[in-house]
Image (cartoon, helix red, strand yellow):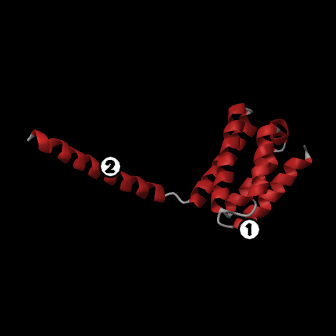
Amino acid sequence: MKRSFWPILSIFLAAVCAALFFLWRGAAAEYRMEDLRLHGMIHAHTRFSDYLDSGEEGDYWYGTAEFQTMVDCAMAENLNGTTDANAAAGILIYSSELAQSRLRDVCAILETCMAQPDNTAQWEISMNELRHLLEEGA
């Protein structure tokens, strides 16, 4: 009995690990990169809007982090316009005072993207517009 315990336990644990792995992969497959990009876009807009209403610095920085999530997902999707989006994210991070003064415009551009989340051509144009809007004030 003692000799057969360890091999049986090892096989059982291997089976449990395999089952958990397949469950994990199935759950991960439920989220498409486009959905994560849209999620980042929506939450960035929400936090930037909250900042405009309350002036809480935490809302601005949380929105900036969500914006970066959107950019990272766009890069993973290999979308055109990621260079402009990444430059805009850099301005949001490193020139926060300038970006905060243009936040209403940033929100308007994000609203345009959110209205047609699958329109990647519009996203590219909007990110270029956003980059130039933020760079003008730099």
**Nearer the observer, 89 or 100:** 89
Q: Position of residue 66 (x, y in %)?
A: 65, 45
Q: Position of residue 95 (x, y in %)?
A: 83, 38
**Nearer the observer, 49 or 9:** 9
Work out whether 90 lies above or below 79. above
Q: In the rendering, which numbered label is found on residue 17?
A: 2
- Taking the spot 60% from the left edge, 60% from the top edge, the residue there is 34
Q: Nearer the viewer, mark 1 or mark 2?
A: 2
- Taking the spot 63% from the left edge, 58% from the top edge, the residue there is 76
- Label located before the other in sequence (1 or 2): 2
Cα gap from disc 1 to disc 2, whole angstroms: 43 Å
Apparent side of residue 33 relative to residue 56 in the rendered image (left or right): left
Work out whether 94 lies above or below 131. above
Q: In the rendering, which numbered label is found on residue 121?
A: 1
Secondary structure, mark 1, is helix
Q: Position of residue 32 (x, y in %)?
A: 54, 60
Work out whether 26 lies above or below 106. below
- For badge 1, the amino acid type reads Ala
